[in-house]
Structure formats: structure tokens, C-alpha cells
Image (tube, rainbow, N blue to C red):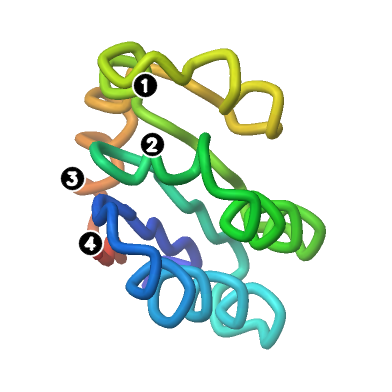
Amino acid sequence: MTEKLTVIWTSGDKEVALHMAFMYARNAKLKGWWKEVDLVIWGPSDKLAAEDPEIQEELKLMQHVGVNLKACITCAMRYGVVEKLQELGVDVIAMGPPLTEELKKEGSAVLTI
């Protein structure tokens, strides 16, 4: 069984981010439900993360507890937010290959929101 969870956050809805994606990712790491937790910012969530101060504070809190933050570079480029996400400490990369690798792992745990 895997000890890594990948949460793919795609929704541009702030309430979904705060009350589902972030809450689960943060608690999964804090409470030891998973040894490693990645939060992947992908699609409309890129724009929300770059523009909303409350979302940015929540991202910092997640980083503080050990959640790894990543973002799809293609989406970030389309929204014009690559630099802003990098300033927030997000690893902005091509997500296709690492996500594919994660999905192919036996027992992989991926949650898409």
C-alpha cells in the first residue's frame, strides 16, 4: 500500500478549496494519515491561488505542515501566473509525466477535486 497521496485541485471555486481540498490535504499530513501529501494546482485553481490572499495564506499553512505544492506549468502559463505561484513557493512544472507515473504505481492514491 502506498504512503503517498496526491490531491489534484482543479476547481476555481474558493469554497471547494477551503472546505474540501485544503482541509483534507492539510489534515492528511498533520494527522499522519499519509506520510507524503502533494497538492497539485491545476486548471482554474492556478488563477485562484495566484489572486486570492486567503487562499495564499492557506497554501502557506499547508507548506508549513509539510504538504508539497506543485502546479501545472502549462495551465499557469495560460493564466499568466507562473511567477506568482513560484513566489508562493509552488513548484511549477510539467505535471503530465509525474502524474502519469503516480497513477501507474500500484496502490496509488490520487484524489481529484
Residue 104, label in figure: 3
Percent coordinates x, y for residue 93 in the rendering = 43, 19
Q: Are marks 2 and 3 in contact (CB under 8 Å)?
A: no
Q: Which of 29 and 81 is in front in this view?
A: 81
Percent coordinates x, y for residue 32 in the rendering = 66, 82
- First reached walking from the N terminus: tag 2 or tag 3: 2
Q: Indicate left or right for 27 with 100 as reference.
A: right
Mark 4 lies on a secondary structure that is: strand
Percent coordinates x, y for residue 75 in the rendering = 27, 23
Mark 2 lies on a secondary structure that is: helix
Q: Which amino acid, by three-letter code, is at mark 4?
A: Thr
Q: Nearer the viewer, residue 88 or 28?
A: 88
Q: In whole angstroms, how far apart are the C-alphas of marks 2 and 4?
A: 15 Å
Residue closest to the far right:
64
Q: In whole angstroms, how far apart are the C-alphas of marks 1 and 2?
A: 6 Å
Q: Which amino acid, by three-letter code, is at mark 1?
A: Ala
Q: Do the residues labelled 1 and 3 touch (CB within 8 Å)?
A: no
Q: Which amino acid, by three-letter code, is at mark 2?
A: Asp
Q: Name the residue under label 2.
A: 46
Tag 1: Cα neighbours inside 10 Å, few (<14), some, or many (≥20)? many
Q: Name the residue under label 4.
A: 112
- In the image, residue 18 sits, relative to residue 7, either above or below, namely below
- First reached walking from the N terminus: tag 1 or tag 3: 1
Q: In whole angstroms, how far apart are the C-alphas of marks 4 and 3?
A: 16 Å
- In the image, residue 104 sits, relative to residue 29, either above or below, namely above
Q: In whole angstroms, how far apart are the C-alphas of marks 2 and 3?
A: 25 Å
Q: Which of 48 and 88 is in front in this view?
A: 48
Tag 4: Cα neighbours inside 10 Å, few (<14), some, or many (≥20)? few
Q: Are marks 1 and 2 in contact (CB under 8 Å)?
A: yes
Which residue: 71% across, 79% down?
A: 30
